[in-house]
Amino acid sequence: MLEDIKNLRKDYRAHTLGAGDVKESPILQFSAWFEEAVAAQLPEPNAMTLATSTLDGAPSARIVLLKGVDEQGFVFYTNYESRKGKVLSQNPKAALVFLWHELQRQVRVEGGVERVSKEESEAYFQSRPKGSQIGAWVSPQSQIIIRREDLEEKAAALEQQYARAEHLPLPPNWGGFRLHPTLMEFWQGRSNRLHDRIQYTLLADNKWKIERLAP
C-alpha cells in the first residue's frame, strides 16, 4: 500500500473563492466558513492544528480544539505546564490550521499568543463536563508516567472528594491562550490544483489587506 501513496489524488470542484466573495474582516469570513462546516455536520469542525516553536527554532504541532473566536482572536485551553504551554510561555507566537476536507477548504492563521484572564479560564473550566474537570486535575500533561492506573486512582479519589460538588476549582496550572491573528489565509480547492487562496494581512492601522495568492 505505501508504494501507492504517490498515486493518491483528488480533483476539487466543490466551490470557488474570489477576492470579491470574502468579507472585509477575516474573522467574519472564518465565522461564515465555520458555520457552513457545522451545518454540513462535519466531525469536530473546531479541531485545529496548533504549531509552535521553541526560541531556537525547533517546531512542534498537535491537534487542539477551538473554544472561542471573536475579533480579538482564537481561544484554546491547555495545561500551562504541558509541552505546548511551556513553549508558548517562552515564545508566544503560533500558527493554526483548520482543514474541512469535505468542503475542500483550509484556513491558516498566524499571530502572537497571550494567556486569557483567570476569570475567563475559570468560567470555561467549570462549563466542562465534571469528568473533564477531574481529568485536568489528575493529568500532569506531557510528563512521563509509569502506570495509567495511577491516573485512574487519582481520578477516583477526586470523584469521591467532589461527589456532592457541581464544579471543581480551577487548577492553578490550567487555562486558556488567545492567538491574535496578524495573517489569515483561506484556501479553496479547485480543479487541476489551481486552487483559490485569499490572504489577509494586518496592517499598522489595524486594517486588513486582502490579496490573492498563486496556488
Image (spheres, rainbow, N blue to C red):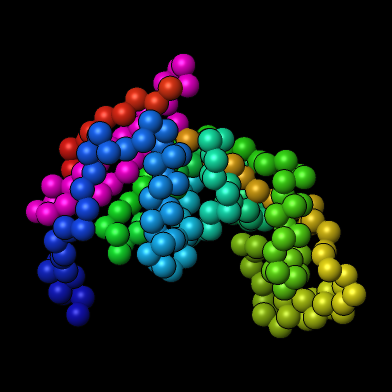
- Depth check, front residue: 98 or 3: 98
Q: Residue at x 76, y 60 (%)?
A: 126
- Depth check, front residue: 120 or 63: 120
Q: Quadrant of the C terminus?
A: top left
Q: Is residue 136 visible?
A: no
Q: Residue 81 at what x, y percent from top left?
A: 68, 53
Magenta run includes residue 209: no
Q: Is residue 159 visible?
A: yes
Q: Residue at x 67, y 56 (%)?
A: 79
Report the span colored magenta: 182-206
Position of 141 compared to 202: left or right?
Answer: right
Mark count: 0
Position of 56 compared to 133: left or right?
Answer: left
Q: Quadrant of the N terminus?
A: bottom left
Residue projecting furthest to the top: 205
Q: Residue 68 at what x, y percent from top left?
A: 58, 49
Q: What is the quadrant of residue 152 in the picture? A: bottom right
Q: Residue 40 at what x, y percent from top left?
A: 37, 64
